[in-house]
Image (cartoon, rainbow, N blue to C red):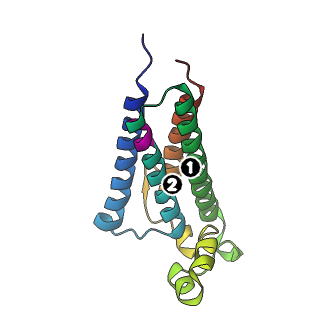
Amino acid sequence: MAPANPRTLFFLAVIACLGLIGGALYLEHGVGLEPCPLCIVQRVCVMLFALVCLVAAFHGPARLGRRIYGGLTLLIALAGAATAWRQIWLQSVPVDEGDACLPPLEHLIDALSLREVLSLAFHGTSDCTALSWSLYGMSLPEWSLLAFAGMILFSLFQILRRG
């Protein structure tokens, strides 16, 4: 059996990422869930992953190219997974610990510079601790972490595959 065409695999990864972004936009605009800063960072990671996969799909890389694209997508997927893990941890911390979260994003934007807001966004705001939606007992960051795990496996497959 011949190995799957790299162009096809990268294009399928783009389709999967578009599905993830479509689902996130539906939850935001259709259901009314406002994304927190960590959610936005996760969305950016999914979009960057899709962009690298789209470039790879058009390029149709050989073995070295697959490894380079796989390495780039692996770094992006690891960053997204770390962000999702951070949000899961924030949601598990008792509210009375106080140090776990920052003020809401609107307050940070009014009070700080853009650079400081971006830096603090990775720490999480009080919006990041809200458990406002779940599916099959899993919260959005848990689903996001599962998606990033799939992206990591895809990236490792591209890096390690022969032929």
> Within the image, what quadrant is residue 72 found in?
top right
Vertical position of residue 77 compared to residue 115: above or below: above
Q: Which residue is mark 1?
A: 76
From the top left corner, tell me how far across and down residue 114 is, in percent: 56, 79
Number of dots carrying numbers: 2
Q: Please rate how many residues cluster around mark 2, counting C-alpha atoms within 10 Å: few if below 14, some from 14 to 19, many from 20.
A: many
Name the residue located 48 percent from the left edge and 52 percent from the top edge. 48
Vertical position of residue 64 compared to residue 79: above or below: above
- What's the residue type where badge 1 is placed? Ile
Instruction: Please identify the quadrant where the N terminus is shown.
Output: top left
Name the residue located 48 percent from the left edge and 48 percent from the top edge. 49
From the top left corner, tell me how far across and down residue 78 is, in percent: 61, 48
Magenta stretch: give its range: 53-57
Q: In the image, 16: left or right of 81?
A: left
Q: Which residue is mark 2?
A: 45
In the rendered image, residue 125 lying in the magenta stretch gets the answer no
Vertical position of residue 18 compared to residue 123: above or below: above
Q: Are marks 1 and 2 in contact (CB under 8 Å)?
A: yes
- What's the residue type where badge 2 is placed? Cys
Q: Secondary structure at mark 1?
A: helix
Vertical position of residue 2 compared to residue 158: above or below: above
